[in-house]
């Protein structure tokens, strides 16, 4: 279990399946609460202690990893670029034609 006020740690614990108690009243990473391992407990000592004891007794928070947090974002981004980008989009309007970017050999343009 981790007790924190850090948003980054909230994400890391969700990836690792570790219960996380956030000692704040809000979070900029709500998916860690709705789909991860994070619980916002606030800053009141009694709430922090109560939730800590609950987790230690085995009443853990949800332990699923949020959807699409599978380490495959780069592959999905490349696939989107390959299927949606047009070769003309690879050039820059302020560069002379001889500086136009050439598509990668694996690039597949849609008709």
Image (cartoon, rainbow, N blue to C red):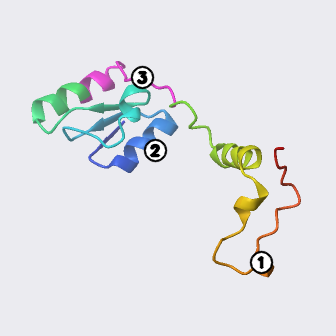
Q: Position of residue 30 (x, y in %)?
A: 35, 35
Q: Answer above or below: position of 42 versus 96.
A: above
Q: Which residue is mark 3?
A: 62
Which residue occupies 83% across, 62% down? 104
Label 3, secondary structure: give it. Answer: loop
Label 1, secondary structure: give it. Answer: helix
Q: Which residue is mark 1?
A: 97
Tell me which label, 3 or 1, sits earlier in the chain. 3
Tell me which label, 2 or 3, sits earlier in the chain. 2
Q: Which mark is residue 12?
A: 2
Location of the N terminus by quadrant is top left
Q: Position of residue 67 (x, y in %)?
A: 54, 30
Instruction: Compute the Cα span from label 3 to label 1.
Output: 55 Å
Of the residues tagged 1 and 2, which is closer to the observer? 1
* Residue 74 shown left or right of residue 18 in the figure: right
3 and 1 marks in contact (CB < 8 Å): no
> What crowding class fits label 2: few (fewer than 14 Cα within 10 Å), some (14-19), or many (20 or more)?
some
User: Total label count?
Assistant: 3
Label 2, secondary structure: give it. Answer: helix
Instruction: Compute the Cα span from label 2 to label 3.
Output: 14 Å
Q: Position of residue 70 (x, y in %)?
A: 61, 38
Which span of residues is magenta-colored? 52-65
Of the residues tagged 3 and 1, which is closer to the observer? 1
- Say which of 85 and 72 sits in front: 85
Tell me which label, 1 or 2, sits earlier in the chain. 2
């Amino acid at each position: 279990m981790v007790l924190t006020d850090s948003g980054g740690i909230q994400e890391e614990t969700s990836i690792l399946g570790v219960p996380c108690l956030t000692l704040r009243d809000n979070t900029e990473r709500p998916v860690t609460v709705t789909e991860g391992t994070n619980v916002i407990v606030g800053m009141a000592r009694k709430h922090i202690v109560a939730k800590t004891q609950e987790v230690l007794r085995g009443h853990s928070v949800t332990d699923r990893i949020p959807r699409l947090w599978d380490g495959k974002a780069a592959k999905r981004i490349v696939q989107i670029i390959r299927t949606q980008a047009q070769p003309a989009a690879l050039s820059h309007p302020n560069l002379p034609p001889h500086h136009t970017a050439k598509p990668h050999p694996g690039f597949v343009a849609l008709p």
